Image: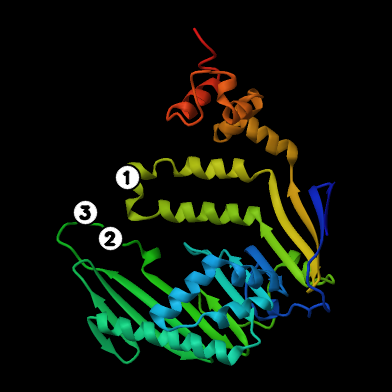
């Protein structure tokens, strides 16, 4: 059984969700992975939850996934079952604005089969690195170099405390043509870490630095203080700030004086307008093997959202539906209005769109 209650609050809406699954069992453990994440205060998205059994069940019972799993095993001799098994435990995800072109992404998963998982993962990484060595222009210790007429790529691989740390540096080669395309600095260096440390799977597109202080964000810390084992935090304003800072970085590239970049300031202003009604979307709750309970809070100024929809051409489709009550019925059964236009006709969508915006109406 399941239930959903929607209430209004001073800041927006509150949704209360309750569901009983087919399984039965004891409550799961408290969440702990957030203590192993390091971050500043500019968090865009964060989640930490136990009991991902439902996700694992959906995957293992899906015929398409089973086919993909078998193909991977047949072509690479890699059994991904240990990776799927990891989904039955606690998982945490962090997306954070660090002032760079791309946000920091950090994924942690608590493993019950850590040794088996680590063995499979190390085997896959070793195989990929060995294949890359065959394609490299030159190799030196844990460094691979790839050269072509435009770029030089240097890849390094180091193993530290169970994690594989990769770094890729891309250099644009000097050209006689002063107008030749050159890779922007923000795209010249890439890093990521992946591996198993202390029974936890780690992936991050930054160097992993475990911080005992955990996540340095007041709102998230307040959520962690509640009696919950399932948390989600999404800050729409932080997302807006990241997008605007990314646009600023793009505008500072050498190519920024071209015609393609002339509307960047307008885009930043439009982002202010689009995100103005939104605040944070948060969820706290408890998950067990038999029940799911959650309270979802949505910070939303409904008046501003309605004004935005009414005043923006971005929402032309919604305005059309507001102005033309019967547009959905027309698409559902076009013959009601135009006897000579059938739903399967190639021009039917165009005719009924023009009708919905009152350009054509019936017969002349």
Please, which residue is most extreme toward the top here?
364
In the figure, is residue 266 to the left or right of 188? right
| Secondary structure under the numbered disc 3 in the rendered image | loop
According to the picture, the residue beneath numbered tag 2 turns out to be 182
| Secondary structure under the numbered disc 1 in the rendered image | loop
| Secondary structure under the numbered disc 2 in the rendered image | loop
Asked if the residue at tag 1 contacts the one at tag 2, i.e. Cβ–Cβ closer than 8 Å, the answer is: no
Residue 84 appears in which quarter of the rendering? Answer: bottom right
> Of residues 70 and 301, which is closer to you in this image?
70
Q: Name the residue rendered at 59%, 55% in the picture.
A: 239
> Of residues 119 and 66, which is closer to you in this image?
66
Residue 153 lies, in percent from the top left, at 29, 74
**Is residue 208 shown to the viewer in this render?**
no
According to the picture, the residue beneath numbered tag 3 turns out to be 179
According to the picture, the residue beneath numbered tag 1 turns out to be 258
Residue 20 lies, in percent from the top left, at 82, 65
Mark 1 to mark 3 CA distance (whole Å): 12 Å
């Amino acid at each position: 059984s399941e239930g959903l209650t929607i209430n209004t609050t001073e800041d927006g809406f509150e949704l209360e969700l309750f569901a009983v699954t087919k399984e039965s069992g004891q409550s799961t453990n408290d969440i702990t992975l957030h203590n192993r994440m390091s971050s500043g205060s500019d968090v865009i998205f964060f989640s930490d939850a136990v009991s991902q059994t439902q996700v694992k069940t959906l995957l293992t019972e899906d015929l398409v996934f089973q086919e993909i799993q078998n193909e991977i095993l047949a072509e690479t001799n890699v059994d991904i079952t240990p990776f799927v098994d990891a989904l039955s435990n606690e998982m945490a995800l962090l997306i954070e604005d660090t002032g760079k072109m791309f946000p920091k992404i950090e994924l942690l998963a608590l493993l019950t089969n850590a040794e088996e998982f680590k063995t499979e993962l190390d085997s896959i990484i070793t195989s990929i690195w060995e294949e890359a060595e065959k394609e490299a222009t030159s190799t030196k210790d844990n460094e691979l170099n790839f050269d072509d007429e435009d770029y030089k790529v240097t890849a390094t691989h180091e193993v530290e405390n169970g994690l594989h740390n990769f770094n890729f540096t891309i250099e644009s080669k000097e050209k006689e043509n002063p107008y030749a395309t050159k890779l922007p600095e923000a795209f010249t260096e890439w890093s990521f870490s992946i591996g198993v440390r202390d029974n936890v799977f780690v992936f991050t597109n930054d160097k992993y630095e475990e911080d005992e202080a955990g996540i340095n964000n007041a709102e998230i810390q307040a959520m962690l203080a509640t009696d919950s084992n399932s948390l989600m935090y999404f800050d729409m304003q932080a997302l807006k700030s990241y997008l605007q800072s990314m646009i600023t970085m793009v505008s500072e590239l050498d190519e920024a004086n071209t015609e393609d970049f002339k509307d960047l300031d307008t885009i930043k202003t439009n982002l202010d307008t689009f995100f103005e009604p939104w605040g944070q979307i948060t969820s706290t709750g408890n998950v067990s093997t038999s029940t799911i309970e959650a309270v979802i809070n949505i910070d939303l100024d409904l008046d501003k959202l309605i004004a935005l929809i009414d005043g923006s051409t971005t929402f032309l489709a919604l305005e059309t539906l507001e102005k033309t009550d019967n547009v959905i019925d027309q698409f559902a059964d076009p013959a009601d209005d135009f006897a000579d236009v059938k739903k399967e006709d190639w021009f039917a969508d165009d005719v009924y769109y023009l009708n919905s915006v009152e350009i054509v109406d019936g017969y002349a």
